[in-house]
């Protein structure tokens, strides 16, 4: 019997392992190579016509990696090795980085010149977009299929029409079928058959797709039949009216979002100025402190940006509120009854706060990241969409307003604030510690200003001068709405925001603000106490 040999057994084991790996791996590679081989060779050609045929070949063979290869071409990440004649995926075209072939084998890029990118021309890019759209027609998600049809509207070819008609027969989604009908109607506008043309115009009547309007405009300019031309003009007029209507809705939406920012900026001042009668020129800097608090919270939570904004809201309220209490206790309490001195003192405080922020964070503006759940938009139709960040600002403004209203109407602090603001002497005689109420009231108004800073940090960069941009707006809102009236602040802020957005398109941003200022000055001449004047003892005081 032959003695046991460890070396022989080791060789036998390696040979067996190699055979097993070969048996399992070789067929897969062969399948991939055989199906991709022709297309790969064409894509590595220098002639763009050959590359274009390579793309068509991928579609004809229905290769499962067609979408991936098209995306790699669009992203300029598909290369080929000059000597090996194999396609490689290269994310970073740098010496020392990894290149991966389509079978998943990796190799390090020793010389960049060994690899050459598969280049495209504009015709091929259009071909790729068309193929991707046609592939999207077979997606499981109806929204993806609708988006695919919408992409095809940009370049409708005879081949596209045949694909759309085939899809229409099996399509179950009403929206997708309607979109296919629009695409086919746009194509029918090229026909010479009057009946077909009339049906196409009828189908496009009311469609808000840009391609539908463009097709109708082109048809009107070239139509030979007066009846068809008139029909197309009527359809076009109806579409333009709908576009104008949604344009007004968009202006209203932008105005409400701007108005919400004004309400958030002014509602804190409505407490300190309206209720306490303090002309706080440092109000804008309290907003700025809230914005910087948001920035610092994001620095402390770099891996949890999604949650940082929720942490920043109470943090900004506390930080700005404490700064406000410090200002009231340190300066303002000595100046009650002397508005001019209060104005000058708070103006000096605003300069100190600005310089302090410059020293801590530098004079440069800082950007605050917007969480993903606040990004994006809600598409209502092709000409009207709602930006999520603006929608959240509007909702946030309403929540802050309701919360503040409940605090002032339903809590003991609110009752004491109203008592002190209406008759300080009587409130004292009833045992209310007016000094403590003054500090807490000023802290409440300052804290709300800090919350406004959190909202503003999502719309603009955070900088030492950002508060100055909102101090005038805040006073405008409070004076226009009626001093000391929260409902007046809400109505005034939203009204000024909408009016500003209506004026901006034809007057410009600066002139629109000047016109609003002139309007408020004239309005105050007629109604000195604003839209919602205070009544009772507070007004008499």
Image: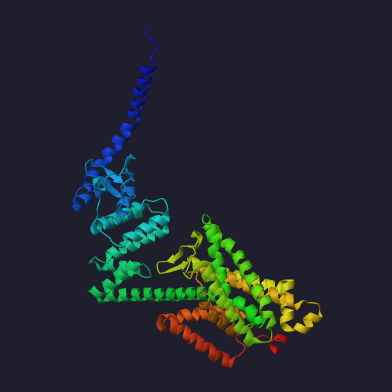
Q: Quadrant of the N terminus?
A: top left
Q: Does residue 172 sit above or below 412 in this rendering?
A: above
Horizontal relation, residue 206 to residue 252: left or right: left
Where in the figure is residue 356, as x and y percent of width and height? 55, 71
Horizontal relation, residue 500 to residue 68: left or right: right
In this view, the residue farthest toward the top is: 1
Where in the figure is residue 217, as x and y percent of width and height? 29, 73
Horizontal relation, residue 444 to residue 123: left or right: right
What colour scheme does the image use? rainbow
Q: Does residue 467 sit above or below 388 in this rendering?
A: below
Q: Does residue 414 sit above or below 95 in this rendering?
A: below
In this view, the residue farthest toward the front is: 359
Identify the residue shown where x is 81% and y is 79%.
430
In this view, the residue farthest toward the bottom is: 525
**Front-lying residue, 155 or 475:** 475
Regarding residue 65, the answer to whether it shows in the image is yes
Identify the residue shown where x is 50% and y is 60%.
371
**Front-lying residue, 341 or 316:** 341
Regarding residue 265, the answer to whether it shows in the image is no
Q: Quadrant of the C terminus?
A: bottom right
Identify the residue shown where x is 54% and y is 87%.
520
Q: Quarter-wise, where is residue 521 in the image?
A: bottom right
**Front-lying residue, 1 or 195:** 1
């Amino acid at each position: 019997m032959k003695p046991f040999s460890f070396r022989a057994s080791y060789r036998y084991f390696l040979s067996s392992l190699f055979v097993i790996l070969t048996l399992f791996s070789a067929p897969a590679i062969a399948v991939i190579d055989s199906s991709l081989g022709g297309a790969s060779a064409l894509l590595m050609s220098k002639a763009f016509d050959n590359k274009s045929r390579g793309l068509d070949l991928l579609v004809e063979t229905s290769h499962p990696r067609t979408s991936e290869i098209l995306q790699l071409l669009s992203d300029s990440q598909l290369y080929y090795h000059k000597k090996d004649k194999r396609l490689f995926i290269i994310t970073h075209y740098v010496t020392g980085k990894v290149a991966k072939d389509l079978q998943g084998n990796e190799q390090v890029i020793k010389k960049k010149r060994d690899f050459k990118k598969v280049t495209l021309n504009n015709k091929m890019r259009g071909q790729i977009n068309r193929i991707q759209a046609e592939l999207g027609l077979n997606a499981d998600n109806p929204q993806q299929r609708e988006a695919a049809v919408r992409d095809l509207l940009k370049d409708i070819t005879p081949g596209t029409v045949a694909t759309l008609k085939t899809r229409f027969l099996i399509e179950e989604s009403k929206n997708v079928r309607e979109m296919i009908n629009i695409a086919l109607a746009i194509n029918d506008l090229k026909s010479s058959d009057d009946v077909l043309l009339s049906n196409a115009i009828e189908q496009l009547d009311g469609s808000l797709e840009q391609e539908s309007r463009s097709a109708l405009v082109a048809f009107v300019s070239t139509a030979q039949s007066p009846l068809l031309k008139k029909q197309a003009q009527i359809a076009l007029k109806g579409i333009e009216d709908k576009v104008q209507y949604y344009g007004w809705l968009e202006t209203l939406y932008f105005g409400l979002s701007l108005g919400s920012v004004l309400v958030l900026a002014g509602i804190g001042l409505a407490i300190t100025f309206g209720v306490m009668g303090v002309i706080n020129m440092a109000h804008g800097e309290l907003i700025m402190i809230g914005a910087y608090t948001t920035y610092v919270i994001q620095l402390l939570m770099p891996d949890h940006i999604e949650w940082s904004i929720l942490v920043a809201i109470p943090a900004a309220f506390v930080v700005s509120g404490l700064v406000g209490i410090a200002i009231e206790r340190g300066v303002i309490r000595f100046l009650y009854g002397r508005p001019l001195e209060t104005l000058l003192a708070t103006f000096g405080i605003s300069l100190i706060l600005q310089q302090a922020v410059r020293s801590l964070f530098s004079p440069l503006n800082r950007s605050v990241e917007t969480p993903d759940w606040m990004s994006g938009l809600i598409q209502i139709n092709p000409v009207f969409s709602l930006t999520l960040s603006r929608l959240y600002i509007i909702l946030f403004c309403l929540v802050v307003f309701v919360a503040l209203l409940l605090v002032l109407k339903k809590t003991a602090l609110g009752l004491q604030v109203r008592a002190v603001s209406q008759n300080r002497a009587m409130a004292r005689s009833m045992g209310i510690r007016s000094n403590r109420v003054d500090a807490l009231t000023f802290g409440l108004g300052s804290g709300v200003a800090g919350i406004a800073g959190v909202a503003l940090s999502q719309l603009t960069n955070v900088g030492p001068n950002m508060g100055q941009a909102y101090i005038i707006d805040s006073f405008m809102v409070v004076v226009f709405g009626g001093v000391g009236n929260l409902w007046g602040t809400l109505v005034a802020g939203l009204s000024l925001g909408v009016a500003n957005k209506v004026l901006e398109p034809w007057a410009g941003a600066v002139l629109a603000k000047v016109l609003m200022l002139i309007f408020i000055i004239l309005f105050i001449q007629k109604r000195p106490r604003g839209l919602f004047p205070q009544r009772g003892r507070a007004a008499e005081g």
